[in-house]
Protein backbone atom coordinates (compact mmCIF):
# COMPACT_ATOMS: atom_id res chain seq x y z
CA UNK A 1 0.00 0.00 0.00
CA UNK A 2 1.24 3.44 -0.84
CA UNK A 3 0.60 6.39 1.35
CA UNK A 4 -1.40 9.10 -0.27
CA UNK A 5 0.41 12.43 -0.24
CA UNK A 6 -1.63 15.58 -0.15
CA UNK A 7 -0.29 18.56 -1.87
CA UNK A 8 -0.80 21.73 0.11
CA UNK A 9 -1.28 25.00 -1.64
CA UNK A 10 -1.15 28.37 0.03
CA UNK A 11 -2.61 31.59 -1.13
CA UNK A 12 -0.02 34.32 -0.77
CA UNK A 13 -1.57 37.68 -0.08
CA UNK A 14 0.17 40.89 -0.96
CA UNK A 15 2.35 42.05 1.89
CA UNK A 16 2.50 38.57 3.39
CA UNK A 17 6.02 37.86 4.62
CA UNK A 18 5.67 34.08 4.90
CA UNK A 19 6.48 33.43 1.27
CA UNK A 20 10.16 34.39 1.44
CA UNK A 21 13.02 33.49 3.69
CA UNK A 22 13.98 36.59 5.64
CA UNK A 23 17.19 35.05 6.99
CA UNK A 24 18.90 34.67 3.65
CA UNK A 25 19.67 38.34 3.06
CA UNK A 26 23.25 39.30 2.41
CA UNK A 27 22.88 42.30 4.70
CA UNK A 28 22.49 40.16 7.80
CA UNK A 29 25.32 39.04 10.03
CA UNK A 30 25.15 35.99 12.25
CA UNK A 31 26.84 36.14 15.63
CA UNK A 32 26.96 32.56 16.88
CA UNK A 33 27.25 33.30 20.60
CA UNK A 34 25.43 36.03 22.44
CA UNK A 35 25.48 34.59 25.92
CA UNK A 36 27.94 36.08 28.33
CA UNK A 37 28.38 32.93 30.41
CA UNK A 38 26.60 34.24 33.48
CA UNK A 39 23.53 32.34 34.50
CA UNK A 40 20.84 34.30 36.30
CA UNK A 41 20.57 31.60 38.94
CA UNK A 42 23.24 31.69 41.62
CA UNK A 43 24.38 28.25 42.77
CA UNK A 44 23.61 27.72 46.44
CA UNK A 45 25.43 24.40 46.77
CA UNK A 46 28.81 23.19 45.74
CA UNK A 47 32.36 23.53 46.91
CA UNK A 48 33.04 26.69 48.93
CA UNK A 49 35.89 27.64 46.59
CA UNK A 50 33.55 27.40 43.60
CA UNK A 51 30.98 29.59 45.32
CA UNK A 52 33.70 32.10 46.23
CA UNK A 53 34.94 32.19 42.62
CA UNK A 54 31.39 32.68 41.37
CA UNK A 55 30.87 35.62 43.73
CA UNK A 56 34.21 37.12 42.71
CA UNK A 57 33.37 36.87 39.00
CA UNK A 58 29.94 38.41 39.54
CA UNK A 59 31.51 41.23 41.56
CA UNK A 60 34.06 41.90 38.81
CA UNK A 61 31.25 42.03 36.26
CA UNK A 62 28.98 44.24 38.37
CA UNK A 63 31.68 46.71 39.41
CA UNK A 64 34.07 47.36 36.50
CA UNK A 65 36.41 49.53 38.58
CA UNK A 66 37.54 46.38 40.40
CA UNK A 67 38.49 44.80 37.09
CA UNK A 68 40.37 47.96 36.16
CA UNK A 69 42.25 47.70 39.44
CA UNK A 70 43.17 44.07 38.70
CA UNK A 71 44.34 44.94 35.19
CA UNK A 72 46.45 47.77 36.61
CA UNK A 73 47.93 45.31 39.08
CA UNK A 74 48.78 42.91 36.23
CA UNK A 75 50.51 45.76 34.37
CA UNK A 76 52.47 46.76 37.49
CA UNK A 77 53.48 43.13 38.10
CA UNK A 78 54.67 42.92 34.49
CA UNK A 79 56.87 45.98 35.00
CA UNK A 80 58.19 44.47 38.24
CA UNK A 81 58.95 41.25 36.35
CA UNK A 82 60.96 43.25 33.83
CA UNK A 83 62.95 44.94 36.60
CA UNK A 84 63.68 41.63 38.31
CA UNK A 85 64.67 40.10 34.97
CA UNK A 86 67.18 42.88 34.27
CA UNK A 87 68.62 42.51 37.80
CA UNK A 88 68.93 38.73 37.38
CA UNK A 89 70.59 39.14 33.98
CA UNK A 90 73.14 41.49 35.53
CA UNK A 91 73.99 38.76 38.06
CA UNK A 92 74.55 36.14 35.37
CA UNK A 93 71.14 34.51 34.89
CA UNK A 94 69.78 33.69 31.44
CA UNK A 95 66.43 34.70 29.96
CA UNK A 96 64.24 31.64 29.28
CA UNK A 97 62.08 33.37 26.66
CA UNK A 98 64.05 33.42 23.37
CA UNK A 99 62.17 36.43 22.00
CA UNK A 100 62.82 38.50 25.10
CA UNK A 101 66.41 37.23 25.19
CA UNK A 102 67.07 38.60 21.71
CA UNK A 103 65.34 41.89 22.57
CA UNK A 104 67.31 42.20 25.81
CA UNK A 105 70.52 41.50 23.92
CA UNK A 106 69.69 44.32 21.50
CA UNK A 107 68.51 46.94 23.99
CA UNK A 108 66.94 46.77 27.45
CA UNK A 109 64.72 49.80 26.80
CA UNK A 110 63.40 48.22 23.60
CA UNK A 111 62.62 44.99 25.46
CA UNK A 112 60.85 46.92 28.22
CA UNK A 113 58.83 48.91 25.68
CA UNK A 114 57.76 45.76 23.83
CA UNK A 115 56.86 43.95 27.05
CA UNK A 116 54.82 46.84 28.41
CA UNK A 117 53.19 47.46 25.04
CA UNK A 118 52.03 43.86 24.79
CA UNK A 119 50.88 43.88 28.42
CA UNK A 120 48.87 47.08 27.92
CA UNK A 121 47.35 45.76 24.68
CA UNK A 122 46.25 42.54 26.37
CA UNK A 123 44.87 44.49 29.35
CA UNK A 124 42.94 46.74 26.95
CA UNK A 125 41.53 43.71 25.15
CA UNK A 126 40.47 42.14 28.42
CA UNK A 127 38.85 45.41 29.49
CA UNK A 128 36.99 45.65 26.21
CA UNK A 129 35.62 42.09 26.51
CA UNK A 130 34.87 42.33 30.23
CA UNK A 131 31.23 41.28 29.94
CA UNK A 132 32.20 37.70 29.12
CA UNK A 133 32.77 35.25 31.91
CA UNK A 134 35.73 33.52 30.24
CA UNK A 135 37.53 36.85 29.93
CA UNK A 136 37.11 37.53 33.65
CA UNK A 137 38.36 34.01 34.39
CA UNK A 138 41.35 34.62 32.10
CA UNK A 139 42.07 37.89 33.91
CA UNK A 140 42.18 36.11 37.26
CA UNK A 141 44.40 33.37 35.78
CA UNK A 142 46.80 35.95 34.32
CA UNK A 143 46.93 37.74 37.65
CA UNK A 144 47.71 34.48 39.45
CA UNK A 145 50.43 33.67 36.91
CA UNK A 146 52.04 37.09 37.27
CA UNK A 147 51.94 36.79 41.07
CA UNK A 148 53.69 33.41 40.84
CA UNK A 149 56.28 34.82 38.45
CA UNK A 150 57.10 37.79 40.67
CA UNK A 151 57.23 35.49 43.71
CA UNK A 152 59.69 33.30 41.80
CA UNK A 153 61.83 36.35 41.05
CA UNK A 154 61.82 37.41 44.71
CA UNK A 155 62.89 33.93 45.84
CA UNK A 156 65.54 33.83 43.11
CA UNK A 157 66.90 37.22 44.17
CA UNK A 158 67.07 36.03 47.78
CA UNK A 159 68.96 32.88 46.77
CA UNK A 160 71.40 34.80 44.55
CA UNK A 161 72.23 37.33 47.27
Image (cartoon, rainbow, N blue to C red):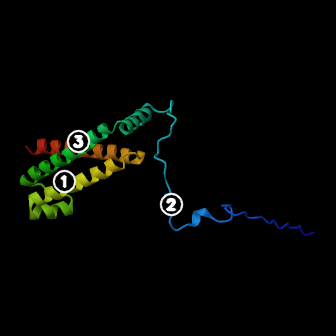
Residue 37 coordinates in the image, percent (x, y): 47, 45
Mark closer to the chain start, 3 or 1: 3
Q: Quadrant of residue 1?
A: bottom right
On screen, residue 80 versus residue 31, left or right, reads left
Query: 10 or 92: nearer the eye?
Result: 10
Q: Residue at x 37, y 44 (%)?
A: 136
Compared to residue 64, the image places residue 25 above or below, namely below
Residue 76 coordinates in the image, percent (x, y): 19, 44
Task: Specify the label residue 116 is tagged with.
Answer: 1
The mark lying in front, picked from 3 and 2, is 2
Task: Specify the label residue 26 is tagged with.
Answer: none
Q: Residue at x 27, y 50 (%)?
A: 123
Task: Specify the label residue 30 is tagged with.
Answer: 2
The mark lying in front, picked from 1 and 2, is 2
Q: Secondary structure at mark 3?
A: helix
Q: Secondary structure at mark 2?
A: loop
- Could you tell me if the residues under marks 1 and 2 are in contact, i.e. CB atoms within 8 Å? no
Q: Residue at x 41, y 47 (%)?
A: 132
Mark closer to the chain start, 3 or 2: 2
Q: Quadrant of the C terminus?
A: top left
Residue 70 coordinates in the image, percent (x, y): 27, 41
Which residue matches tag 3? 73
- Could you tell me if the residues under marks 3 and 1 are in contact, i.e. CB atoms within 8 Å? no
Q: Residue furthest front?
A: 14
Crowdedness near tag 2: few (<14), some (14–19) or many (≥20) residues, C-alpha within 10 Å? few
Mark closer to the chain start, 1 or 2: 2
The answer to whether one can see residue 120 in this image is yes
Query: 35 or 96: nearer the eye?
Result: 35
Query: 103 or 152: nearer the eye?
Result: 103
Q: CA distance from mark 3 to mark 2?
A: 36 Å
Q: CA distance from mark 1 to mark 2?
A: 35 Å
Q: Residue at x 23, y 41 (%)?
A: 73
Amino acid sequence: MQACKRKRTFIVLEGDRRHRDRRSGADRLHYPERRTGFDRRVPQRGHPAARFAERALRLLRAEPWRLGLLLSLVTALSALDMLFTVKALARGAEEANPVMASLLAADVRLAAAVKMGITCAVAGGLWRLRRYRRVLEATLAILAGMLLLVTYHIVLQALMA
